[in-house]
Amino acid sequence: MKIRGIEIEKISDQLWEIPPVDGMRVPGRIYISQDMLEKTGLADESLKQVVNVAHLPGIQKYSLAMPDIHWGYGFPIGGVAATDFENGVISPGGVGYDINCGVRLARTSLEYTVVENRISKLIENLFHNIPTGIGSSGAIKKLSAKEIKNILVKGSKWAVENGYGTDEDIESTEENGQLQNADPSVVSERAIERGMDQAGTLGSGNHFLEIEVVDKIYDEDKAKAFGLFKGQIVIQIHTGSRGLGYQVCEDYLKILIKAEQKYGFNLPDKQLACAPIQSKEGHDYLTAMKCAANFAWNNRQVIMNLTKRTLQQTLGMSDSDLGFGLIYDVAHNIAKIEKHEINGELKKVCVHRKGATRAFAPGSLFIPEKYRTAGQPVLIPGDMGRYSFIAAGTSKAMEETFGSACHGAGRVQSRHKALAAAKGKNLVKELNEKGILIHAAGYKTIAEEMPHAYKDVSEVVDVMNNAGIIVKVAKMRPIAVIKG
Amino acid sequence: MGYKFIDHTADIAVEIQAHSLAELFQFASAALIESLTNPHTVLAVEKKTIIFFADSYEEALVSFLSELNYFLTVKKWVFSHIENICMEQEDSKIKFSAIVKGENLSVDHELKLEIKAITYHQMEIKFKKEYYTTRIVFDI
């Protein structure tokens, strides 16, 4: 069949392929169900973007898209591409402006039924303690440029060294919250300036902090390994590298647009600007991106610790009573140097995950020892009115998607349409009636982020689960939400 | 001539039509201001000068709007008027300059949203039938 002029063939109930044509170096592959395909029709430019990504020099096997695919800049959101480390390119379009935007999930030993009547006070205090919204700042004292540079090198370790967490938090973070060889000398002064007062801030848009209840367990063994039980209170945090990351992307797009012309790649989209990984331009971008990724991990670590402190103060609980701890933290906008089996050989590649989550299999040495039997926790947030999921990575993900899975629901309605649909409604009241309390910097954000502006995340997760890329572990429902 | 917001699933997209490049940049900045704040709440009591070099008009447009966004998000300085937009060829580069008027951000100003970046997505400044056109997408 053809969608917007692009030939697409069905491989299985969850997988579709675009055969290579006109300069595509590899086929495109999209994980999506027939039902989702018919409903969304991939009516935006996202399929064309899968085709564009297949043009990248050094791309391996496939230009991939997860079922939450939608229109992005350069890559589609939900796009995954691995490029040869020696002869391939790196592209900021495969990472995005919000470098290391990601999610973390923290557990408590609290049962919902026990703290139900304290949730209102709790979310009020969290909203007070965690800076949220446009240009939010001041979660912790304004840092000097020297301290910001320390964060860029150390990532989450900076937070722990400064009293915002524990060594166990570090162990439960992808890459231990610190990409190695991050050198701040390639990060612009303006990027540092944009990060100065933003460590520990949530920001705006679709970023959030949620208090959730574990609503359903799908896999008891894996849930146990992740420390989850039905009725448990957990905290989910979604944010990234804030202004610092946006600036790194902006700075290097400018450089890489020129590099792409210099190397004569002639790619179909300016936002796909790239440079050889082994070139100065490519190396500098990768290094600066690592710095921004470390800033983001530190950011989520600080926010989580402020959350823990707020929970303790509000509920008057000791560390041991609260049982607070990080389950896992995953990046979903990042490029990583990894080794994957390609045509029977272990090959070093640069895996771009743009709105896609790493989903490493049981046994991987790159996941915490405590999860090596279950597989890597994969965090998939939904919209604020329905549910989120936690799943585990599989060996099939290693074989088919460079160990990657979906990252969320994906918008189906523009902010403008969502605002129009919200007119005359009292969304706060509607959510309250569903048992969800909400605090936001402004009502407009609530309207723009209304549940029906998003795909049903369960459909996205089911495609990945049925394709064997992940195994569903648990479903969480929000009971209190902070929006930027 | 002017600018109009067009529907975009996740972000803000604007289409612009202008008689000249300077007017195109003027309309683009007006679209940015309208997206970020209510310009009627901003007093043009202070001015700043923007000067930079670019390799293309697209790069100049992204740099210009990014600079304005930087004033707001980092310098906490909100603007309402752009004047004297000038672009001239200097060697192989485009020299851009403009004057921006506004004031320090305060609780009196309405802030609508945070723009992460001005993207190059679908941006191509074209000249046809005596007017300039382009599309700009703001990543939010």
Image (cartoon, coloured by chain):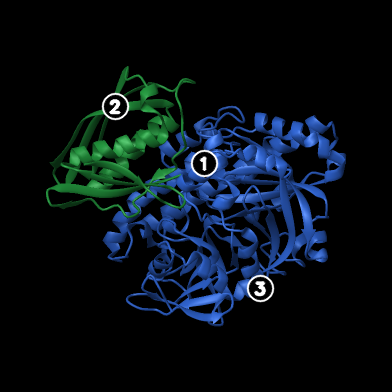
Chain colours: A blue, B green
Specify few, some or many for label 1: CA neighbours under 10 Å numbering under 14, 14-19, or 20 or more. many
- In the rendered image, which residue does mark 1 sit on? A242
Which quadrant does the N terminus of chain A fall into? bottom left
Q: In this view, does B65 lie to the left or right of A444?
A: left
Q: A251 or A226: nearer the eye?
A: A226
Specify few, some or many for label 2: CA neighbours under 10 Å numbering under 14, 14-19, or 20 or more. some
Can residue A33 be seen here? The reply is no
- In the rendered image, which residue does mark 3 sit on? A466
Q: Which residue of the protein is positioned furthest toward the top in this rendering? A: B45
Rendered view: A287 above or below B29:
below
Q: Residue at x 12, y 52 (%)?
A: B129
Calculate the distance from the C-alpha at mark 1 to the C-alpha at mark 2: 27 Å
Tell me the element at label 1: helix
Q: Do labels 3 and 1 share a chain?
A: yes
Which quadrant does the C terminus of chain A fall into? top right
Q: Which amino acid does label 1 sit on?
A: Arg
Q: In this view, does B90 lie to the left or right of A379?
A: left
User: Which labelled disc corresponds to residue B81?
Assistant: 2
